[in-house]
Amino acid sequence: MKITVNGKISEDALKVILDTQKKKTIIIDDYCKKEKLESLFYKDSELEYEYQKPEKQVTPKPKKVETRKDDKGN
């Protein structure tokens, strides 16, 4: 996420700006998930945001190996 602010601003104003931008990113994320989009780039006068669908990490299941005991106790 990239936010552009021109000039000096107070700490409170910065918090308000960041909260507003966070709300925008949540809306964009929800929309992309609902519409099943792979990626989306959003830009306005205050915010540049790029959505990328998170890749699922697939962990292979371990193979089950059957073991047999013979009469010798092995």
Image: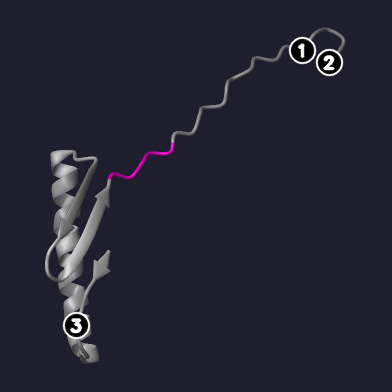
**Three-letter amino acid code of the residue under disc 2:** Asn
Q: Are marks 2 and 1 in contact (CB under 8 Å)?
A: yes
**Three-letter amino acid code of the residue under disc 1:** Lys
Residue, x 16% and y 54% (percent of image)?
Answer: 28
Residue 1 position by quadrant = bottom left
Q: Are marks 3 and 1 in contact (CB under 8 Å)?
A: no
Q: Give the magenta-colored segment's residue range.
A: 53-57
Residue 3 position by quadrant = bottom left
Side of 51 relative to 70 (left or right): left
Residue 56, x across and y down, in percent? 38, 39
- Which residue position holds label 2? 74
Is 69 above or below relative to 53? above
Residue 67, x across and y down, in percent? 70, 15
- Which residue position holds label 1? 69
Q: Using a 10 Å C-alpha cutoff, classify the residue at mark 1 as few (fewer than 14 neighbours), some (14 to 19) or many (20 or more).
A: few
Residue 54, x across and y down, in percent? 33, 45
| Pick the front one: 18 or 9 | 9
Q: Which mark is residue 58?
A: none
Q: Using a 10 Å C-alpha cutoff, classify the residue at mark 3 as few (fewer than 14 neighbours), some (14 to 19) or many (20 or more).
A: few
| Pick the front one: 30 or 37 | 37
Is 64 above or below relative to 17? above
